[in-house]
Image (cartoon, rainbow, N blue to C red):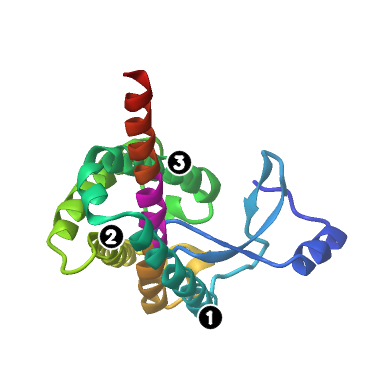
């Protein structure tokens, strides 16, 4: 069980503000950071609940970031390059989603995820979802190639659509009403924020994949 913050530390924590974070299942919530018996990790203060207002605010933040981030990606990744880094994209997606699920389940298992997943799934989900999302990245890559205009834009938009689908599934599992900490948020807010949040995540994956692709090409040139 997380150690309860003393009142003086609680006032400091409230004064320092909140952080938005969360991958999957009503993501993007305001978290406070504090010391626990297991080390320095995100915790929910006693009685804390995620609200629809928090998620709508996070939606706005992600939308603003995406509005700047996606055009930069379109500018830096041309169509020819996008066609060439399929496997760099798959590898990056597998690593990214396995890592983010490992962090999410490790940080929020007791407060959120044990309400919707069996105990044995805690260690299976990260690698399984890493492989699943790697396959999804390949599907998104193929569909984006048929997208009118820039395939980079298509990839990010399709990534947002995938985020919406995953969150609809999470709501069906009960993620919005089973964990007490999430009962204050409307499912519509959780599904909407996922669109823009996942656009941002897939944009990061696209950026890393492009970097890996260019690094590999450079290494091949200098090794000849």
Return the disc, 3 or 2, that comes first in the chain's sequence: 3
Please tell me in which quadrant of the rendered image residue 176 appears.
bottom left
Q: Nearer the viewer, mark 3 or mark 2?
A: 2
Residue at the far right: name it: 8
* 10 up-or-down from 185: above or below: above
The residue tagged 1 is 53
Q: How many marks?
A: 3
Q: Mark 1: give few (<14), some (14-19) or many (20+) Cα within 10 Å.
A: few
Look at the numbered disc 1 and give the secondary structure of its residue: helix
Residue 100: percent from left, percent from top: 45, 46
Residues in magenta? Answer: 200-208
Q: Nearer the viewer, residue 82 or 125?
A: 82
How much space separates mark 3 and mark 2, taking CA atoms?
A: 27 Å
Q: Is residue 72 visible?
A: yes
Question: In the drawing, what numbered circle is on residue 152?
Answer: 2
Return the disc, 3 or 1, that comes first in the chain's sequence: 1
Residue 95: percent from left, percent from top: 38, 38
Q: Name the residue at 38% across, 65% down.
A: 70
Look at the numbered disc 2 and give the secondary structure of its residue: helix
Dots 3, 2 in contact, CB < 8 A: no
The residue tagged 3 is 102
Image quarter where the C terminus lies is top left
């Amino acid at each position: 069980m997380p150690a309860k913050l003393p009142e003086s530390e609680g006032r400091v924590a409230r004064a320092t503000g909140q952080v938005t974070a969360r991958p999957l299942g009503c993501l993007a919530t305001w978290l406070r950071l504090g010391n626990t018996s297991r080390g320095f990790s995100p915790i929910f203060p006693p009685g804390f609940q995620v609200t629809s207002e928090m998620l709508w605010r996070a939606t706005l933040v992600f939308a603003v970031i995406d509005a700047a981030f996606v055009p930069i990606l379109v500018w830096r990744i041309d169509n020819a390059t996008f066609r060439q880094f399929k496997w760099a994209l798959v590898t990056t997606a597998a690593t990214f989603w396995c890592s983010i699920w490992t962090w999410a389940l490790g940080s929020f298992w007791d407060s959120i995820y044990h309400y919707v997943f069996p105990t044995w799934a805690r260690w299976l989900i990260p690698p399984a979802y890493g492989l699943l999302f790697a396959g999804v990245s390949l599907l998104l890559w193929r569909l984006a190639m048929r997208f009118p205009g820039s395939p980079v834009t298509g990839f990010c938009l399709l990534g947002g659509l995938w985020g919406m689908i995953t969150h609809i599934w999470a709501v069906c599992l009960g993620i919005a009403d089973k964990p007490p900490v999430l009962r204050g948020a409307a499912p519509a807010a959780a599904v909407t924020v996922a669109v823009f949040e996942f656009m941002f995540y897939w944009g990061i994956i696209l950026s890393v994949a492009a970097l890996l692709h260019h690094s590999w090409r450079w290494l091949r040139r200098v090794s000849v």
